[in-house]
Image (spheres, coloured by chain):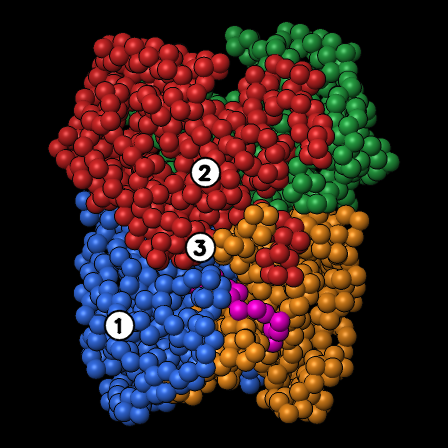
Chain colours: A green, B red, C orange, D blue
């Protein structure tokens, strides 16, 4: 498992299992001089904290982050920033069921096949809990991006078939309801649909939208490390995500070139686009407009409904997964998408610093 | 631009611009002992060659690959495999228009913004021609995968709003029509739709499907280098791709857990799935089933229709892009998707070799 | 500072400053199934623990390691192994002097120049304390290598001008004296030389030798990641090391080819060497013999003797560095060299697993 | 063999075997806007060209470099720079001897053991010829560094036991004699010693010194990617190099702290050192002074003298290696050391661009 690092310049490496001692991360490559404290991290972590509403896991975790290194007198020093979140909840007893049965829709089976051993407590490394470490790292990226006027904003765009009405879109509203939907009416309807699914021992999925504002043109590295390609990896690396699209996305497949292309025009010396079908990138680089992408999130695989499965020793059985499970992953994943988008953007921001000789000139005072 | 390398174990680095001396690639990390010759590469390259039908660029390129290193007496030696494809067509005159105008839907503007300089001839580094180097590399990956019984099969699933009928799906048919559609009737209808768009000086998009067969369970590295996440990066790194989804993809957003989960059952000692909504991965690792993903391809941005744009010195103008352009990118991109999927799979196949101590034991004869 | 990761397959990332909350590391890529517990790590850490003798820092640290993740029921799971060592000693008051003066021979000045900020407490990130994290990681590598019959053995070869007599070389003796010299008589003489230097408020340096046994031929990647090249990086990355040589090393510069070449002969079907001037590598790969390299360690830069230096605000002053400082770094660095050599070897062991198609065949049961 | 890439920001990947079609390299990550042409590369390549004197291989190679990509209208574009050098000499017949016998001191045996196959023609991938690709890449790094006032200067410091007299050191003289010794008298004596060794069918070794001037303080990444650590890897990755030392190097082992430390003083607002025992780095970062390191080069392993060895099928035989071989590698390796030092420095120069937030501010115009 050499896949625990993301980014090449702003590099994040995470550790931790659901029911181990702790989870955490190291950020290597964060520039020195960024004001940073735990108070910058905690609020973002709190947004994914379980037990906040009837729609999220009732696990009693404080998810308190500790910065272990890399910050001195309130500023980053350039040294790796390690952050740790203790696992308070280690009631392994709850999870004895998982030890011997492969849960449908989970990674129990594939972990066992790959490694021949698996930490079955709470899903171990494949638990959604691992994303807390990403969010902690993401909060640092968010702070760095904010310094450059870049803001990442993710939200629940659709849950259980209920979509946000673009005309009612409100950034403020996102933070007022527990579903992180930027549309109050939609949030109410979606909550009803979630409740209905839960009543039937079932779960629902949805779509997360994400906007990145304040980008200048040229972010992203051509060919394999395109901005959209790295965003896609970042977002698909979140357990429940099954799809990614940018701008018109799959809809572009049915458009004509004349409909999909964004024209350019010049206004007060600045080049602008006549529309934004591209979603803010061209040739894998930011085009100066707002980046807009969407992630499809599958329904929570842990459901109380009976499902067909097998035991680790090959017996056919049925399982109904009980315990503290969200009937929908979307709301808690919103901040994870935001974190991953921020990490991707921060990494490419650093990567872009050496694109031009003239930029290096300014760095080295030439 | 440090984004020209893909893969960590089976590493591909490409070079080249549309109208430079040549394009090519180096593969570092291919195991020694694989039978390989130019005859393994050329057929796959020929599938993306322009000028093959009325729907593809009329540029007269032979796209002949030369292996420069890494192969000795018909086998790979473990040394880097360099491959080169000469650029026969270097008529820069054709492209003088691009030098001074940013084409809508192209990377002209973003390259200029990022680097302050751009090789405008034929799109330079952002030209679709760069993908020939990927296909050459992909052909080596295909050969390696075939040795392990793994096969990647991509195809045009939808073009100009015309979809393949799953009931008529035929692998053989894919290679019989110029649109690489595995359904003859659909191909005929799609061809008509393309012709209609072209007649209106316009272009169309579509969707590419891709199947990977023969995978054992456990391929893919947890957390950031999940199989689906790396596939997503790989596919989105292709210029015109705007979306990626695996299994139910965006459709999963509207399913319930009980509909989306695949149950398990045991048959003759093997664990199988009762359905395949996941698309062949669980927790970012292959689950032993067929991998199925889809890529959304935007319509060709180069259209003869008049579009609004600006010159490099900021004048508002209109442009109608003439020259040798495909009215649809999908057919030629099919083999590129196949190449990128093969490269991703090969990389993770190598990565997986050290997952278990017992695997290392067999390697080192313990 | 993106240099906190070592290795590409067996990847170690360290965090921590001398007087921060804790130091630690993550190992990503350790194969699953390796028996591992804190009892495997602690003994190696204890070997570099300060306060063990009159020659080492009197800092009262227990250096107790905690495994935070990646181990389940006594075995590695393939997930990242995080390990943490708390910093008990955080008496910043001791180090107020460093805050305003650049110590000669230390990294105070260069850190300040690079980052514009520095955690001056105890040297911060550049403190020798950082090496405890490497030793913890190295202990895991040592365990992995032991599984394959590979053993790394480092020792003090020369201290304060006193060299080990090769005829008296004894592995057991190394662990009996506090200088880690495999020659009792030399250790006694070296101790006297150290005491003499200390009496004069001065310090001494020396040379560390390192042997790696049990390697089969072929370890190391040609060209840039040669075994000896990676060992050189590994060893030079230890703060006080100023030189690296393998086999005859600098002495080879004065030999003739006929003296330096090792002949081959065949004995009972095995190829052996008639001598070992190469130090166990040929063309950057292990040649089946014992690897032997040496590292030059400079004298401790912290000395009580008065030295000329400047303050952070540019005043010329003198400094005599007091506090808990070893008069010689060599003994404590022995286990660090061992750790770095083990990490290098483990990384290349994993890298080598995919060198041949036939090796992959065994992994994937073909 | 995944070791063909060097650098993380200014990344060089090489390809090619001694007697394959060609050798070459790709540089990914070179900033856009650097004036560059083949005329910048060729002179440096010419310095390592064989057949220039009685002391170097008589192989008739023109070693003409072609830039294949990444340069447009005389400037780098930010795209990967591919460079190719054709192999004119492909007389495989010459090397039939190697096919069946392992040459002492060469990598024939280890390549065979690692890969089970080897391109034996002229040593294949392990041939010194591979370094031509490094030199081509190094020339680009040299050009980039020159822009920032940084100069790398390597030279033969000692050959066959004859050392340069520091008092006669002359940069101009280095380029006047074929041994690249910056001391005419020493060059004459060394030439005699080489001739004597050759007359006895033998070869000699030596030491290469290297100076890097014009560095500001702070270059190099702490911990594993220290400037000196990466230089050590770079230099040891050259086939015949057996040792690396910086500043006092191995001599520091015998110094006292008060002798080895360099004091600081302030002069006209600038911090300077009272001496330079460190060799220009502190804590793995450039300290603002001249970097000085040395590399030990073993005697040419190919000698006409009879040596004991084995055949690939295990017979004990003797071999005397005939053909076009240098009796000393040092002179031709001088430019290779220069290239590797330049590549290392360029990589760390780019790495350092994002060390501080204030540097990023200048890049992004904040």
Residue D94's mark? Answer: 1
- Does dot 1 land on a helix, a strand or a loop? helix
> Looking at the picture, does residue C281 appear above or below residue B69?
below
Q: Which region is colored magenta?
A: C211-224
The percent coordinates of residue C240 (x first, y second) are 57, 72
Residue B33's mark? Answer: 3
* Left or right relative to B78: residue B117: left
Q: Quadrant of residue C92?
A: bottom right
Disc 2 chain ID: B
> Looking at the picture, does residue A87 appear above or below residue C38?
above
Q: Residue at x 60, y 22 (%)?
A: B277
- Does dot 2 land on a helix, a strand or a loop? helix
Q: Extreme right residue here? A: A93
Residue C1 visible to an observer of this rendering: no
Confirm whether the magenta stretch covers residue B35: no
> Looking at the picture, does residue A171 appear above or below residue C354?
above
Q: Earlier in the sequence, mark 3 or mark 2?
A: 3
Name the magenta segment's main secondary structure.
loop
Disc 1 chain ID: D
Distance CA(mark 1)–CA(mark 3): 25 Å
Of residues C329 and A50, the one nearer the viewer is A50
Q: Quadrant of residue A129?
A: top right
Q: Residue at x 79, y 61 (%)?
A: C39
> Looking at the picture, does residue A361 appear above or below residue A186?
below
**Residue linked to disc 2:** B342
Of residues B333 and B223, the one nearer the viewer is B333
The percent coordinates of residue C132 (x first, y second) are 68, 63
The percent coordinates of residue D237 (x first, y second) are 43, 67
Q: Number of labelled discs?
A: 3
Q: Are marks 3 and 2 on the same chain?
A: yes
């Amino acid at each position: 498992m050499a896949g625990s690092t993301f980014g090449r310049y702003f590099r994040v490496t995470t550790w931790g299992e659901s029911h181990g001692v702790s989870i955490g991360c190291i950020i290597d490559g964060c520039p020195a001089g960024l004001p940073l404290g735990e108070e910058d991290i905690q609020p973002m972590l709190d947004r994914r904290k379980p037990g906040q509403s009837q729609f999220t896991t009732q696990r009693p975790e404080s998810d308190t982050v500790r910065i272990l290194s890399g910050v001195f007198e309130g500023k980053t020093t350039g040294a790796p920033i390690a952050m740790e979140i203790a696992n308070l909840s280690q009631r392994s007893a709850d999870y004895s069921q998982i030890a011997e049965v492969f849960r449908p829709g989970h990674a129990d089976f594939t972990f066992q096949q790959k490694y021949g051993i698996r930490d079955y407590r709470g899903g171990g490394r494949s638990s959604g809990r691992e994303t807390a470490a990403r969010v902690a790292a993401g909060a640092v990226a968010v702070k760095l991006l904010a310094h450059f006027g870049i803001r990442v904003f993710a939200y629940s765009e659709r849950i259980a078939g209920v979509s946000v009405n673009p005309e009612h879109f409100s950034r403020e509203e996102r933070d007022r309801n527990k579903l992180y939907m930027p549309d109050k009416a939609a949030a109410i309807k979606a909550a009803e649909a979630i409740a209905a699914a839960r009543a039937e021992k079932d779960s629902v999925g949805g779509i997360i939208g994400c906007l990145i504002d304040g980008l200048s043109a040229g972010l992203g590295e051509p060919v394999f490390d395109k901005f959209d390609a790295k965003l896609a990896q970042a977002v698909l690396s979140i357990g429940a995500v099954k799809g990614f699209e940018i701008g018109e996305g799959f809809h572009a497949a049915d458009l004509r070139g004349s409909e999909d292309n964004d024209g350019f025009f010049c206004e007060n010396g600045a080049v602008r686009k006549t529309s934004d079908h591209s979603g803010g990138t061209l040739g894998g680089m930011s085009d100066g407009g707002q980046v807009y992408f969407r992630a499809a999130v599958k329904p929570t695989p842990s459901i109380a409904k009976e499902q067909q499965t097998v035991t680790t020793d090959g017996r056919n059985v049925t399982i109904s997964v009980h315990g503290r499970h969200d009937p929908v992953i979307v709301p808690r994943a919103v901040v994870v998408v935001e974190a991953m988008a921020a990490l991707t953007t921060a990494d490419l921001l650093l990567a872009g610093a050496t694109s031009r000789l003239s930029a290096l000139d300014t760095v080295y005072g030439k």
